[in-house]
Image (cartoon, helix red, strand yellow):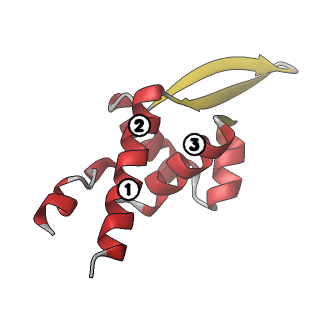
Amino acid sequence: MKTILANFNKAFESRVRLGIMSVLAVSNSMDFTGLKETLAVTDGNLASHLRALEEAGYITLEKSFINRKPNTKYTITEQGLESFKSHLQALEELINKK
């Protein structure tokens, strides 16, 4: 069991970070507003979790303007996807452990 728990990634322990990674793993990218609405979190809460995932190298951001309004789009990185898959595999192993 210790080896399974060792494969858990602390970066994904938060419900919000787990949600961000889940959404980006499926859709590859989404803007800030889409993530905020999908996860039902506040601007500040989402921003702090996005920053932590970006600093870990799991997501990247791209800033642009749409109809003169700022837009920030987040994309999962290859490293982020692999780390997330490993975390999910560890969860699955723990659940299926008998």
Residue in the image at 64% along x and 62% along y: 40
Disc 3 secondary structure class: helix
Q: Quadrant of residue 39?
A: bottom right
Which is more N-terminal, label 2 or label 1? 2
Q: Quadrant of residue 70?
A: top right
Q: Quadrant of the C terminus?
A: bottom left
Asked if residue 5 lies left or right of residue 76, the reply is left
Residue in the image at 37% along x and 28% along y: 57
Compared to residue 95, the image places residue 34 above or below, namely above
Q: Residues within 10 Å of mark 3 (few under 14, many from 20)?
A: some
Work out how far the residue at label 3 is from the one at label 2, CA to CA, in angstroms. Answer: 10 Å
Q: Residue furthest right?
A: 67
* Image mark for residue 89: 1
Work out how far the residue at label 3 is from the one at label 1, CA to CA, in angstroms. Answer: 14 Å
Q: Amino acid at mark 2?
A: Glu
Asked if residue 41 lies left or right of residue 78, the reply is right
Work out how far the residue at label 1 is from the one at label 2, CA to CA, in angstroms. Answer: 10 Å
Q: Residues within 10 Å of mark 1 (few under 14, many from 20)?
A: some
Residue in the image at 65% along x and 47% along y: 35
Closer to the observer: label 3 or label 1? Answer: 1
Image position, residue 6 (x, y; %):
16, 55
Residue identified by numbered label 3: 25
Along the viewing direction, whichever of 83 and 72 lies nearer the viewer:
83
Contact, mark 1 vs mark 2 (Cβ under 8 Å): no
Q: Amino acid at mark 1?
A: Gln
Q: Amino acid at mark 3?
A: Ala
Residue identified by numbered label 2: 82
Compared to residue 53, the image places residue 49 above or below, namely below
Q: Quadrant of the N terminus?
A: bottom left
